[in-house]
């Protein structure tokens, strides 16, 4: 009877230890990530000439390629006091080497600009933006971090133009 009691207590302690280990924040600490770049997207679709809707692509690099969706799905972009979710673009998943993976994220920041490569938007993103994970930990920028502007070009529709 005494032996069964000890085994039961040992089993309960083991279950509590496993539960605590799985819920601790250091459990997934081997998943380290850095910000590789920001790409400021100037999109003129549905706008007049010289009017751009500005959004942002962010590429994060993870040091462990065996990550699960819940580990790369919950990132946020903070610009000054505004928070935007980072939406993973699964089509742009890049495997750089056997131990790293790069994932491209879209942020719908919906800034407006009258010209391409607007310095004020670039400065705001450069100075006041940061990326955090779901636990509130800030993600550091890579040594080769860059911010680059891109423009989306759309072909005009053929509205009965005769050639």
Image: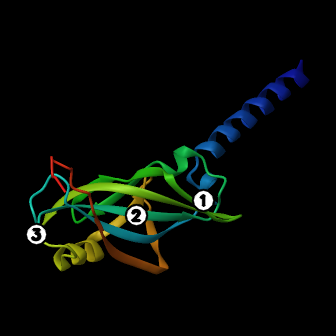
Identify which residue is drawn at 40% across, 60% down.
Answer: 132
View extreme (top): residue? 1
Using a 10 Å C-alpha cutoff, classify the residue at mark 1 as few (fewer than 14 neighbours), some (14 to 19) or many (20 or more): some
> Which residue is found at the position 12% from the left and 56% from the top?
47
Q: Residue at x 22, y 76 (%)?
A: 117
Left or right for 144, reference 84? right
- Snapshot colouring: rainbow
Residue 25 located left or right of residue 155: right
Q: CA distance from mark 2 to mark 1?
A: 18 Å
Q: Residue furthest bottom?
A: 143
The N terminus sits in image quarter: top right
Separation (CA) of disc 1 from disc 3: 40 Å
Q: Residue 150: which quarter of the image?
A: bottom left
Foreground residue, 53 or 1?
53
Asked which secondary structure carries label 3, the reply is loop
Q: How far apart are labels 2 and 3 at the CA level?
A: 23 Å
- Relative to 95, say whether 135 is above or below: above
State the image coordinates of residue 75 (x, y, percent, origin top left): 42, 54
Of labels 2 and 1, the one closer to you: 2
Please state the horizontal and vertical placement of residue 160, each as a whole percent of the image: 15, 47
Mark 1, residue position: 31
Around disc 2, counting alpha carbons within 10 Å, would you say few (fewer than 14), some (14 to 19), or many (20 or more)? many
Whether residues under marks 1 and 3 lie with C-beta atoms below 8 angstroms apart, the answer is no
Q: Nearer the viewer, residue 54 or 4?
A: 54
Pointer 2 or 3: first along the chain: 2
Query: What x and y, as percent, mark residue 31?
Result: 60, 59
Residue 108: x and y, percent?
A: 27, 53
Badge 3 is on which residue? 114
If you read the primary sequence from the N terminus, does the residue marked by circle 2 or circle 1 appear first?
A: 1
- Residue on which the image places disc 2: 58
């Amino acid at each position: 009877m005494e032996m069964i009691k000890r085994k039961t207590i040992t089993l309960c302690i083991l279950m509590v230890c496993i539960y605590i280990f799985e819920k601790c924040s250091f459990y997934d600490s081997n998943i380290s990530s850095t910000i590789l770049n920001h790409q400021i997207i100037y999109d003129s679709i549905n706008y007049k000439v010289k009017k751009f809707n500005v959004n942002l692509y962010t590429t994060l690099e993870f040091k462990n390629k065996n990550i699960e969706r819940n580990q790369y799905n919950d990132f946020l972009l903070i610009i000054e006091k505004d928070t935007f979710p980072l939406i993973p673009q699964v089509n742009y998943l890049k495997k750089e080497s056997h131990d790293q993976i790069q994932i491209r994220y879209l942020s719908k920041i919906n800034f407006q600009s009258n010209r391409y490569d607007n310095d004020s938007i670039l400065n705001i993103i450069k100075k006041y933006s940061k990326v955090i994970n779901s636990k509130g930990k800030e993600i550091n920028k890579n040594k080769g971090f860059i911010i680059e502007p891109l423009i989306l070009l759309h072909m005009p529709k053929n509205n009965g133009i005769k050639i």
